Image: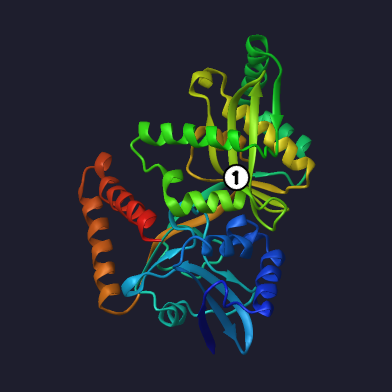
Amino acid sequence: MLDVEIKSAQGLSERERRAWDELQAADRAYESPYFSRAFFEAVARHAQSTRVAVMRANGEVAGFFPFHHGPLGLARPLAGPVSDCHGPLLRKGAGIDPAALVKAAGFNLLSMRHADGATRLFAGALSKRHAMHVIDLGDGFKAYEEGRRALAKSAFRAIRVRTEKAEKQYGRVSHVFCDARPETLRRLYAWKSEQYHATGQIDVLSVGWVRRLVEDLFESKGGAVSAQLSSLWFGDRLAAAHLGLRTRTAMHYWFPGYDPELSDLSPGNILLHRMAEAAAGEKVRAIHLGPGDYRYKTEFANASLPLAEGVICGTGVIGSLAKAGNAMIETLGRKLPARFAHLPSGLARRIDRQLAFRSL
């Protein structure tokens, strides 16, 4: 029999905290920093809606499902729109009834865009499949680079050529894997803000709870999870920077940015290449690049993880209305000409993303 208890971060017992850590460590499917208990606790410090469903079967902890609760049973995955991977952590062999979990947790509507596809817990509802690109460093950087050079020869040759060009123009190209300087972080903020405004997107790092979360994690150096800042320099000029989630064995590529005046030298790619080398030297097994088939991701990635997307609806009135609305959006997309078929779902996702930033 499944028993589900909804708890805050402060409400977890020491035994439950240990069980979470052990569950994550035992299964590489949960290697992402997003599945770390420390990340859950960091989010909880800045978003009061943060909760976790603690699942037990026969009295033993069977899993954890972190989420944000909202009014009328409207829930969101942990960290909402700044999460590239989310979902429940389940003990291997645990027979969890998804309908029982949804009912016990009080979910009327839970929209998931990047659910961990490995669990298959909500396979029926999360029917759209995609993938997260991954740099797998398990065999070391040399083996990784040799493998990618064979398959993405022009991309890796371009990194070498542009590095040499940058050195001729600006001086020595250098990399700081763990840059603790606040001024580097502020410059990254400025680049990201310019990028978001230029592309008509929400300035993610100006949203209060996101900014507080990022800076909290940036200051948590040496913790179970932290936000590690890396930088690339052309001479004494900051060319690119990246702020990403970091655990002992994995990194997540989160907020990259570069000096737009240096875009012809691809400083972002040079930085990612050097980050991969430095990460392998510190025994990091993987850098998760997140979803999206951007060119640099397909060139750098040598592995992938399954993700799923969909809407989980409860059986009540609100859940039924949400299910009907989602079906209407999908039907409209099918009736439109092929080149416009993505517009209804794309608009719905954009509105949902904007609401998510404000509702946590």
| Location of residue 173 (image quadrant) | top right
Q: Quadrant of the C terminus?
A: bottom left
Drawn side of residue 321 relative to residue 258, left or right: left
Closer to the camera, 189 or 108?
189
Q: Residue 161, percent across and down? A: 65, 16
Please state which amino acid type lies under the numbered disc 1: Gly
Residue shown at 41%/81% (left/top)? 103
SS type, badge 1: strand
Location of mark 1 (residue): 244
Name of the residue lying farthest toward the top: 168
- Is residue 13 depicted above or below 297 in this figure? below
Residue shown at 25%/42% (left/top)? 340
Residue shown at 58%/65% (left/top)? 41
| Location of residue 254 (image quadrant) | top right
Closer to the camera, 243 or 148?
243
- Is residue 358 depicted above or below 175 in this figure? below
Drawn side of residue 336 relative to residue 295, left or right: left
Q: Quadrant of the N terminus?
A: bottom right
Drawn side of residue 49 relative to residue 184, left or right: left
| Location of residue 133 (image quadrant) | top right
Residue shown at 70%/37% (left/top)? 177
Closer to the camera, 119 or 243?
243
Q: Residue 4, percent across and down? A: 51, 83
Q: Residue 186, percent across and down? A: 54, 36
Q: How many marks?
A: 1
- Is residue 14 depicted above or below 291 in this figure? below
